[in-house]
Image (cartoon, grey):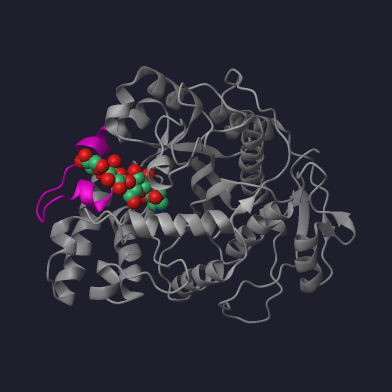
Amino acid sequence: MTSNPTRRAVAVSVLLLAAVISFGGANPTATAASTPPLRDLAASRGLRVGAAINDAATLGIPAYADTLAREYSMGVSENAMKWGLIHPAPNTYDFADADAEVAFAEAHGMTMRGHNLAWWNQNPAWLTGGTFTHDQLVQILDDHINTVVGHYKGRIAEWDVVNEAVALDGSAQPNPWSNGIGNPAYIDQAFRTARAADPAAKLFYNDYAIEQPSQRFDAVYALVTGLVQRGVPIDGVGFQAHLGANTCDSSCVNGMLTNMLALHRLGLQVSITELDVSVVLPPTPASLTEQASMYAGVLKACLLAPNCHSFVTWGFTDAYSWIPSTLPGRGAALPFDESYQTKPAYDALAATLAKPPMAPTCGQFSTPAAAQAALSGNTVDGAPLLDANGDGVACNESAVTTTSTSSSPSTTPPAIATVAVPRFTG
Ligand code: G3I
């Protein structure tokens, strides 16, 4: 195990500082789960709502299993498919826990995300401590992806093929593959091999701290632009969204939407892949209200983006979350409390999903600059992009157009000049 909790804690701490976003009010009292459950509400909006499965053993806890199956239509193994657990020795694969999690999902009509196939962290000692030639590493990566993706062929809807290839400062994140195979050669290889191993799976690049326009998002945008330009088979980008409850206005929804739409214009999907919103412990009614607003805001951005179809939280109950052990003093980051009671965050998600989409009425950006100003200023040619509740408008698939005059994608997101379509009532 090569977990680096110090680096992880520093990275997440900075991320939390960078992600001080909140989107408006919610009821801070716990309530009963909604009828219909989140998964049904989400289905009516064309969205899969998912949660990370802590480990196979937690599926034996009735309240855990019941809540997961009732509320969620997608699962992802929080750890069981990572190299360190699924490939513990050079010629040994251990599918037991991951198989149990996939079987649970299938038994309850849930699809699965696969996480992940190449990462700097949670790699086995035989890999990180070994000495391998370039050709040996190419073979090891190919064999792993062929074996793991092949094992689950036809059963995983989305794979996080490469995870966190960009460091917090936007530079390349060293990992066994970048060091030994070369960057971006290892990324290209991982995607090409995964595509061949399961042509039906959607292939994602997954990363943290890319939820708002930033140099870091630009670095990831440049990375995936390169993949697209080289014809590497990438389908989407995962926004991890490990956030901290704090205060900010609805422009944060627009910021996330801006990034999602930039990727849409590249032809890529986006998924919210690891959302959690930590608060300072112990939680207070005020901090849970802020947290609920954050959850609603991220969901709104996903619903507004035409290319966002999966919305996944990193766990669902505060009984099982990576936050308290990694960020001491913070926690209570999920929509259910430790006793599987709903929190205001749950209510906010249900209420947001339950809002009927508005009939399309389009507004037109006159120029890219006007469009960009509109996104940051919350207006579209004078009309609000997001209303006072943070609900609002975005672009539908058919209406999205780019004004780029270049025939090849640039490495910075182009300005937005397109049509806006309301999908929320206020
Ligand atoms: O499996 C061992 C077990 O044998 C041992 O007894 C136990 C003792 O601590 O440790 C177990 O391993 C732990 C593993 O989770 C499984 O529970 C590791 O110590 C622990 O570091 C590891 O933490 C995981 C972390 O990734 C590693 O960086 C968290 O559960 C997991 O939530 C977290 O998930 C990551 C995503 O994969 C990528 N994005 C960020 C996200 C949060 O850090």
In the current view of this chain or complex, which residue is farthest to the left? 91
Q: Is residue 289 left or right of residue 225?
A: right
Q: Is residue 288 left or right of residue 385?
A: left
Question: Taking 8 as reference, is 167 above or below it?
Answer: below
Q: Is residue 74 left or right of residue 44?
A: left
Q: Position of residue 166 (x, y in %)?
A: 43, 68
In the current view of this chain or complex, which residue is farthest to the bottom? 406
Q: How many marks?
A: 0
Residue 183 placement: quadrant: bottom left
Residue shown at 70%/32% (left/top)? 26
Q: Is residue 79 left or right of residue 220?
A: left
Q: Is residue 21 magenta?
A: no
Q: Nearer the viewer, residue 420 or 49?
A: 49
Question: Taking 11 as reference, is 368 above or below it?
Answer: below
Residue 3 placement: quadrant: bottom left
Residue shown at 70%/51% (left/top)? 248
Q: Nearer the viewer, residue 322 or 410?
A: 322
Ligand 1 found in image quarter: top left
Q: Position of residue 85 (x, y in %)?
A: 22, 46
Is residue 264 something that shows in the picture?
yes
Is residue 200 something that shows in the picture?
no
* Residue range of the region highlighted in magenta in the rendering: 82-100
- The C terminus - image quarter: top right
Q: Nearer the viewer, residue 85 or 194?
A: 85
Q: Position of residue 297 (x, y in %)?
A: 66, 44
Residue shown at 61%/47% (left/top)? 302
Residue shown at 20%/70% (left/top)? 138
Q: Position of residue 397 (x, y in %)?
A: 66, 55
Q: Nearer the viewer, residue 43 or 92?
A: 92
